[in-house]
Amino acid sequence: MGRLKFIDLSVPIEAVPSEFVLPEIVHEDHRKGAEVMKLVFGARDSDLPEGLGWANDTIKLQTHTGTHLDAPWHYFPTSEGKKSKTIDEIPLEWCFSDGVVLDMRHKPNGSVITVEDIKNALKRINYEIKPLDIVLIMTGVDKYWGTPEYLNRGCGMGRESTIWLCDKGVKVMGIDSWGFDAPFVSIRERFERTRDGSVIWEAHFAGRDREYCHIEKLANLDKIPRPFGFKVACFPIKITGASAGWCRPVAIVEE
């Protein structure tokens, strides 16, 4: 085996306008930590190195803050006719497999990725999807991370394209934008124009009929040196009964 290169595919957890709901993050420095340690151990400043203690952090956030893996429970109470899996029930085998990047940067803002789009992207890279592949959709929207524009830019997966990948045996997909579907502002415009409820959250609701997970808020897909021939690790934090779990996806490339 050659030398392995690890590519971080995540955005940080931080209070920036790219988040729909801002996390609350409080950092406690070493001086504050010393005050706590003196109480815990009955110590004085002179008993601690330079009078300093531990640093600590308190965070209040949603499970969908930052880069995260959505569980089927997020989409609907049932999937394929049985109770949907929560994030702590996701098989770990789903979260470490061969990766493939599909470039959708040419798609207009607000558009829906179709089955034909997926097939064309695969044809361009001469690749055939196999079971348990982790499919990463590159929209380029990660370049707007940290700005309000991030929320309403990019394209998103559709119901048919999601089901098509599921029927190929894919269990985990991901996208480098705020959500797996098209931006909410685009979905709303489409619904107001058509009054067709099937356009609302269609890729997520596909999870009612096909059991799968997807990663939202990926980053750096353009830094993966080839569209396939690499591994992806995306293990979620284990939160009992939760609809999602934070994760730090990594592309592992053998050089």
Image: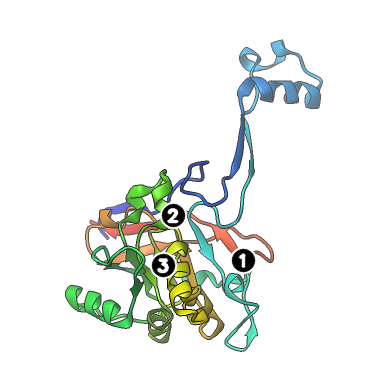
Observer-nearest of 201 and 72: 201
> What's the amino acid at mark 3?
Ala
Q: Residue furthest bottom?
A: 81
Tell me where residue 24 appears, x and y as whole percent: 61, 41
CA distance for labels 1 and 2: 21 Å
Q: Residues within 10 Å of mark 2 (few under 14, many from 20)?
A: many
Q: Secondary structure at mark 2?
A: helix
Vertical relation: 138 (above or below) 73: above
Q: What residue is rendered at 60% in x and 38% in y?
A: 25
- Foreground tag (1 vs 2): 2
Name the mark on residue 151.
2
> What's the amino acid at mark 2?
Leu
| Chain-order first, disc 1 or disc 2 | 2
Tell me where residue 140 appears, x and y as whole percent: 30, 57
Quadrant of the snapshot with the C terminus: bottom left
Q: Is residue 95 visible?
A: no
The scheme the figure's colours follow is: rainbow
| Chain-order first, disc 3 or disc 2 | 2
The picture quadrant where one finds residue 238 is: bottom right
Label 1 with label 3: CB-CB less than 8 Å: no
Q: Is residue 199 visible?
A: yes
Tell me where residue 48 appears, x and y as whole percent: 67, 17
Name the mark on residue 243.
1
Vertical relation: 87 (above or below) 225: below
The picture quadrant where one finds residue 237 is: bottom right
CA distance for labels 1 and 3: 20 Å
CA distance for labels 3 and 2: 10 Å
> What's the amino acid at mark 1?
Ser
Q: Residues within 10 Å of mark 3 (few under 14, many from 20)?
A: many
Residue of label 3: 182
Observer-nearest of 112 and 38: 112
Q: Residues within 10 Å of mark 1 (few under 14, many from 20)?
A: many
